[in-house]
Amino acid sequence: MRAIERFLADEAATIELGEDLALVLKPGDCVALSGDLGAGKSTLARAFLRALADDDGLEVPSPTFTLVQTYELRIPVAHFDLYRLADSSELDELGFDEALSQGICLVEWPERADDALPASRIALTITHEKDGRRVEISGPGERLQRIARTLTIRGFLDQNDHPNARRRHLSGDASIRAYERVYPADGSVSRILMDSPRHKPGPILQDGKYYQQLAHIAEDVVPFVAIDQLLIARGLAAPTIYARDLDQGILLIEDLGSDGILDAAGQPIDERYIESARLLARLHAKQTDREISVDQSVIHRIPDFDRTAMKIETRLLTDWYLPWKRGAPASDDEKREYGEIWDGLIDLLQTSETNLLLRDFHSPNIIWRQERQGLDRIGLIDFQDAMIGPTAYDVASLVQDARVTVAPPLASRIMAAYLAERHANGSFDEAAFLRDWHLMSAQRNCKLVGIWVRLMQRDSKPGYMKHMPRTFAYLQVALAHESLKPLHDWCMKTGILDSESAN
């Protein structure tokens, strides 16, 4: 990838670049800042650190005399100034390698240790040009692509009436999506920016398709825009979309707030879970049109949560979890028997109630708006993977929240609230629904145990493994239903369910 060049008209532009870099640099990135005295290296480094800390008052002393200053931020940062370095070998004594293994290294005057810095570094060179500065950014392709992406987002904001807006990291998730909170320069209310680049095709798994295609995972932002329109039309609190670039995968949307359905200690707030169940019941009681017009040339057809999608998700258990647990791949016989069991279970769903599924309807994706009334208190923010399928799936997602333990008494109250609301809104087969709930719970948790391992091994995100014991506890609840006995027996035979799996 060719080097990136930008003209920085003034100090504010230099600060803005530093803040934008804070959104995309990752642990293991080394940024070599080159330029004459007064070029703006320290200004850019200070802006980067304050943005990463989300603290405009953060003290950022010059490391000219100490040679290195460290910061324990969202991502650890070590700020080096090598102007007084006598020999590049001294870099080891400063703990450079350890700092780079744990976080980001900003290096001013990198020329003093050019031979000791990693070849994969990002080189950022600032030179004087008229009354401003010109910056050239070079480095390995993947790192430059991240920087180009953040600059593309800056251009998107500039073109959509938000020039000079402040951008701060909000969150990332288990996918490639990332979110920012955007503060307009005029002081108006904040916005949320969704950064969702198009999925890159993965390895072909079945029928000439890769995982996202088989599981009907959204590969661009069109499904989000379509389902957002549908939910708003239903009178539900989904975010208004202020600006969008469907090709680039960038949306500027309403900030519904930051209060969720957990308390300060991260525990479920009963009322909020129960109201969320009532919202699901209202949503499931009315049928959904499958086709949604996003604009004159784009129509989104909501996909089915079909046999292929269900089975490719459950395969994550045999493809990822079982090899990790046992240190050896699942046998062909185990895979065959597992697949046949799921074929039989999915056959039971042929007469199930189906409707819109938001998918992943749990605590990270539900906003609580205390100042509102009734179901308008519940803000919905993550639904791009919505499908048409058994309504029990969303209820299983809520009652068995993947990120927090929902104790049995609260689980019973949530389920009772949903069932009461469904009965109040028309004919409803409760017995069939409860069977489907156990089946969908089993399907979801078989998927999740594989996802946690995949995130750790493939995506270097080990933090999700802390959810494994909870996921197995939920799976054991699901397998208690008589219709799930074949799957229960298979899990026992393969050693998936034992005393160790819940520890």
Image: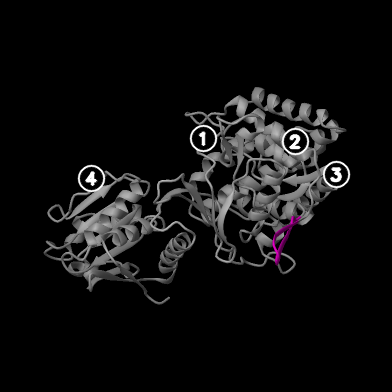
Label 3, label 4: how far apart the Cα atoms are: 62 Å
Label 2, label 1: how far apart the Cα atoms are: 23 Å
Give whichever of discs 3 and 2 has the lower sequence position.
2
Give whichever of discs 2 and 1 has the lower sequence position.
1
Which secondary structure lies at badge 2? helix
Mark number displayed over residue 259: 1
- Amino acid carrying label 3: it is Leu
Q: The N terminus appears in which quarter of the rendering?
A: bottom left
| Residue at image mark 4 | 59
Mark number displayed over residue 348: 3
Give whichever of discs 3 and 4 has the lower sequence position.
4
Q: Is the residue marked by circle 2 packed among few (<14), some (14-19), or many (20+) residues within 10 Å?
A: some
Whether tag 3 and tag 2 are in contact, CB under 8 A, the answer is no
Mark number displayed over residue 282: 2
Give the number of the mark in front: 3 or 2.
Answer: 2
- Amino acid carrying label 4: it is Glu
- Amino acid carrying label 1: it is Asp
**Among the 4 quarters of the image, the one containing residue 428:** top right
Whether tag 4 and tag 1 are in contact, CB under 8 A, the answer is no
Please name the predominant secondary structure of the magenta segment in the image.
Answer: strand
